[in-house]
């Protein structure tokens, strides 16, 4: 701001910035003081619990690290018994990593002739009963299982792992025959 201030106007420009800063601080402090302290602490804890702190998100494509976790029965047995119509790739917000994962999975499914399966991304909090398979990052699988306990849950380390998605699509295709 000082670079575009005309000569003789520096004091007024600096004063206006200082006054704006003080007024903003005073108004913000009123809101902060009125907010209940336990609400702030709860929000911080909730935010921490929603964060993905998985240090295994390396570019490793080792399928042993992407072990399939399924409630009660194996993935292979489950897909033999069910007609898979919808796969949901879910993350905590449903906008970033799960969207990228769903895009990769859609492309692989289409390439392998399984484009009749609906593949979408979602936030775990928005999961509904329409999903047959739910794919989440390992650190979020328990949360997804709590939300949708009677679904097939698969865990992945890296949402961009094409080998993991290829394995899933191959097994589904194999069991559709």
Image (tube, grey):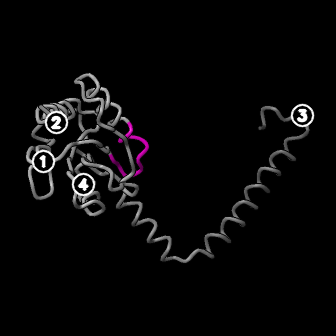
Numbered label attached to residue 141: 4
Badge 3 element? loop
Corner quadrant of residue 36 = bottom right
Mark 2 and mark 3: span between their CA atoms?
A: 73 Å
149 left or right, relative to 39: left
Q: Quadrant of the N terminus?
A: top right
Between 85 and 55, the residue placed more toward the observer is 85
* In this view, the mark in front (2 or 3): 2
Q: Which of marks 4 and 1 is nearer the N terminus?
A: 1
Q: Earlier in the sequence, mark 2 or mark 1?
A: 1
- Residue 29 visible in image: yes
Badge 1 element? helix
On the image, the x and y values in percent for residue 134 come to 26, 48
What residue would you read off at disc 3? Answer: 7
Corner quadrant of residue 109 = top left
Q: Which residue is drawn at 45% across and 71% down?
A: 41
Q: Quadrant of the C terminus?
A: top left
Q: Which of marks 3 and 4 is nearer the N terminus?
A: 3
On the image, the x and y values in percent for residue 176 come to 15, 34
> Label 2 crowding class (10 Å Cα cut-off): few <14, some 14-19, many 20+?
many
What residue would you read off at disc 1? Answer: 81
Badge 4 element? helix
Q: Residue at x 25, y 41 (%)?
A: 57
What residue would you read off at disc 2? Answer: 172
């Amino acid at each position: 701001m000082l670079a575009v201030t005309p000569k003789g106007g520096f004091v007024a420009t600096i004063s206006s910035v200082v006054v704006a800063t003080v007024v903003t601080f005073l108004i913000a402090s009123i809101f902060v003081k009125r907010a209940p302290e336990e609400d702030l602490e709860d929000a911080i804890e909730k935010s921490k619990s929603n964060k993905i702190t998985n240090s295994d998100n390396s570019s490793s494509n080792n399928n042993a690290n992407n072990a399939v976790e399924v409630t009660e029965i194996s993935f292979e047995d489950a897909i033999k018994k069910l007609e898979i119509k919808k796969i949901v790739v879910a993350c905590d917000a449903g906008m970033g990593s799960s969207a990228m994962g769903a895009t990769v999975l859609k492309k692989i499914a289409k390439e392998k002739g399984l484009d009749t399966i609906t593949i979408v991304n979602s936030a775990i909090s928005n999961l509904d009963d329409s999903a047959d398979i739910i794919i989440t990052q390992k650190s979020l699988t328990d949360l997804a299982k709590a939300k949708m306990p009677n679904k097939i849950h698969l865990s992945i380390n890296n949402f961009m792992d094409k080998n993991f998605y290829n394995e899933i699509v191959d097994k589904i295709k194999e069991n559709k025959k």
